[in-house]
Amino acid sequence: MAPSQIARIFGVLGLVTLLIGTAFFWAGAHYILPFSMVEIAALLIAFIYNAIHANDYESLILSDNFVHIESKIGLQIKQVQMARYLTRVDTDSLKNELIELRQGQQSTYFGQFIHANLRPLLAQQISSRMQFPQTVHQAVMSV
């Protein structure tokens, strides 16, 4: 769902909660309205959290000489560039772990948004594409 659709849904839920709280307030149950406000605040926090993480992604781009890895988690964007032929993919890790790409002392992880059972297959595909020259100048993997 798009953030604007979620905003409308949360807005309607907040309005209904506010109407119910106000009706109980005028009927003499004064403690319902503060709980309605707490519920609206919880909806607002949930919306903000969803909006921050709605566009999270990871991408891995293989060019002729480099491996470019970019990830956006929340508000943090991380970019790593490694030499293609010096980079190794850790294919021996357990299947529930992330894929590790290493070049000397530098390492980064990839595959957070891939199901754990599919990570070994993805690691194998990345490793095989890094070893052989591409017929096309770039191979792009994005999740």
Image (cartoon, rainbow, N blue to C red):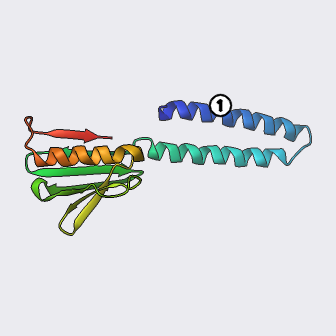
Check the image and report above or below for 111 versus 22. below
Give the x, y percent position of residue 103.
18, 63
Can residue 114 be seen at all in this image of the molecule? no
Residue 52 appears left or right of 36 = left
Does residue 6 sit above or below 132 in this rendering? above
120 vs 14, left or right, is left
Q: Residue furthest right?
A: 28
Taking the view exactly as shown, the residue that stands out farthest to the bottom is 105
Q: Which residue is under mark 1?
A: 12
Picture residue at 78% right of the left edge, 49% below the top: 34
Q: How many marks?
A: 1
| Point 38% across, 52% down: residue | 95
Measured from the top left, where is residue 101 in percent x and y? 24, 57
Q: Residue at x 53, y 46 (%)?
A: 48
Q: Residue at x 10, y 55 (%)?
A: 85
Regarding residue 41, the answer to whether it shows in the image is yes
Name the secondary structure under disc 1: helix
**Label 1 amino acid?**
Val
Estimate the x, y position of residue 71 in percent, counting from the top left: 32, 50
Q: Quadrant of residue 24?
A: top right
Residue 57 versus residue 89: which sits nearer the camera? Answer: 89
